[in-house]
Amino acid sequence: MIRSRRHSLSRWNLRRYLLLLLFPALLGATVPEQWDITEIQVEKIGSRYGSDAKARVNAWLTLIQNYKNSPEKDKLEAVNHFFNQMRFVSDKELWGAEDYWATPVEFLIASGGDCEDFSMAKYFTLKAMGVAVERMHLTYVRALTPNPVSQAHMVLSYFITQEAEPLVLDNLTNDIKPASQRVDLIPVYSFNGDGLWLAKQRGQGQRVSDSSRLSLWSGVVQRMKGLWGQLIDE
């Protein structure tokens, strides 16, 4: 059955159709505003993880600096392309864990990660470039391709306004398309960082209570505080 464009948009316009739940216990776990990494810290990354890791971190910092004053459309395209050059690696293979959410620096050092790592790296990088958090949602979807059986997947959704159709940044493609053109993705729920909201689509009014997801998010935020956590200063 072919869905109408209006129905397709309603699935993705999560702000209009979702119940938003605030988690007060985690309100203090906001992402640090300081994005600068000193030359000394970059050198430490190089010493510990090699020259290639150092080069990737430097390229990332240059990307942020070069696009801070660019139109948001250019920021989206540059960030999506930059991170999509990294390899897809499962958490089990890379971290020895069933589910691990990496910080952007961890992702760059490893030169890869899973779909959640791609999406969060894009989210944090666009935030560093000045894109408002309110315009971005980390969105869990069911991906209908490349396999015939749907799979859990994460993408970054960008809303130019609250009522607008979102654009989808996906590690599976460099093309940033409106949600209505991503018929291979079925949105399930979403959240964004600074507000720490979880949302479930379709307006059913059901509570989203996946505490493990909140714990993973809190872990990412904590590792990003200070001097980028244990990665650099242990």
Image (cartoon, helix red, strand yellow):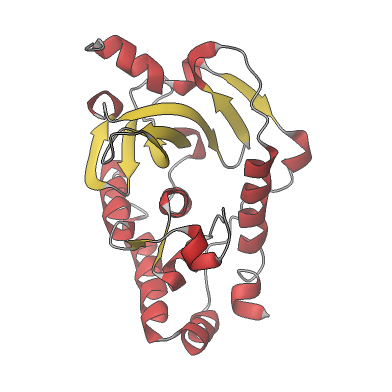
Q: Which quadrant is home to the C terminus?
A: bottom right
Q: Residue at x 62, y 42 (%)?
A: 213
Place of residue 150 in the rendered image (x, y in percent of width and height, measured from the top left): 36, 33
Q: Is residue 189 left or right of residue 222?
A: left
How many numbered circles are shown? 0
Q: In which quarter of the view is residue 33 placed?
A: bottom right
Residue extending furthest toward the bottom: 47
Place of residue 35 in the rendered image (x, y in percent of width and height, measured from the top left): 53, 62
Q: Which residue is drawn at 50% across and 20% down?
A: 201
In this picture, is 190 found above or below 175? Answer: above
Q: Give the camera-side residue of 89 and 165.
A: 89
Residue 30: tell me if it is visible.
Answer: no
Q: Is residue 43 left or right of residue 155?
A: right
Q: Residue at x 37, y 73 (%)?
A: 56
Place of residue 15 in the rendered image (x, y in percent of width and height, measured from the top left): 49, 21
In this picture, is 70 found above or below 91? Answer: above
